[in-house]
Image: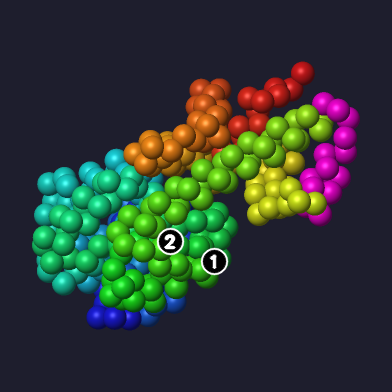
Amino acid sequence: MANFETVGFIGLGVMGEPMCRNLVQKSGLAVIGLDLNPEPMERLAARGVAPGQSVAQVTESADAVLVSLPSGAEVEKICTMEGGLLASVRAGQTVVDLGTTPVPLTRDLAGRFADKGVAFADAPVSRTRAAAEAGTLSILVGGDEATFAAIRPLLDCFAEEVTHCGPIGAGQVVKQLNNMILTETVVALAEALSVGRKAGLDEKLLFETLSKCSADSFALRNHGMKALLPGAFPERAFPTTYMLKDVSYALSLGEAEGVRMPGAELAKTLLEETAAAGYGENYFPALINVLAPED
């Protein structure tokens, strides 16, 4: 895989752990994992992932470093802190951000890595934890052609769709707009389900019928039927706070481009209400709980 022999993987949370597991199982490369929580490191060690000791140690030992963190704040910190990525990389390495990060920060970090002779790509992942477990994620990549070609075999280990969206930042733009659209669709589904219930409809029949009509969508068949309908909003899925962050990033993009986004504003407000109601760590379709609380 390109000139990579050892890959570092930093961030072994809800999505990072299964991605790292698929990487070590399918790539045939040496993989070093690092997380603040020792438990995923212990689980992955049984699969052949070497436990890392620090960001600097992982970076100095690897040819490529993949980073999977909750938000841009964590990405910025791990890059710029003492002993962080920028302080530890060497010319010829590659750094890939698999998380969702603000576009201006992505472009700034890419420039700073380039100054050190290090290739950088934004490659935010899409789809669910179940897709991460199965290795069927969709990954949206921003970066130059050479970097995309080099990292594609790594990404293929945990994704079934890998799309080169354009230059640095393009992957983040697509990801943030995708999650904005998804959230607005889930809001509409939650509204429809809430009204249908109050009107006495068979709610399963409602969603099954909508899936045969022009309202059909991936969100209906997954977030609707598998979460909204049974009222299943577990933790360690994609939580309300994460989606709130992504929608906020999308709104910042719109503001920077001078585009009004009233639908996204409404979704953001509803996610804020959902978090304030105590569902911040629950799977984000929990937003239905603030639309029509149980009588």
Question: What number is the disc on residue 140?
Answer: 2
Residues packed near mark 2 inside 10 Å, few (<14), some (14 to 19) or many (20 plus)? many
Q: Nearer the viewer, mark 2 or mark 1?
A: 2
Q: Circle 1 sits on which residue?
A: 136
Residue 269 in picture, x, y percent from top left: 52, 27
Most foreground residue, 294 or 167? 167
Residue 235 appears in view: no
Q: Is residue 51 magenta?
A: no
Q: Residue at x 17, y 65 (%)?
A: 118
**Helix, strand or loop under label 2:** strand
Give the mark count: 2
Residue 148 in picture, x, y percent from top left: 33, 71
Residue 21 in picture, x, y percent from top left: 44, 66
Secondary structure mainly formed by the magenta segment: helix
Q: Are marks 2 and 1 in contact (CB under 8 Å)?
A: no
Q: Is residue 137 above or below residue 240?
A: below
Give the magenta part as a residue range: 198-212
Which quadrant of the rendered structure holds the N terminus?
bottom left
Q: Residue at x 38, y 53 (%)?
A: 172
Residue 241 in picture, x, y percent from top left: 47, 35
The residue positioned farthest toward the front in the image shown:
258
**Helix, strand or loop under label 1:** loop
Q: Residue at x 29, y 40 (%)?
A: 73
Q: Quadrant of residue 171?
A: bottom left
Label 2, label 1: how far apart the Cα atoms are: 13 Å
Most foreground residue, 40 or 217? 217
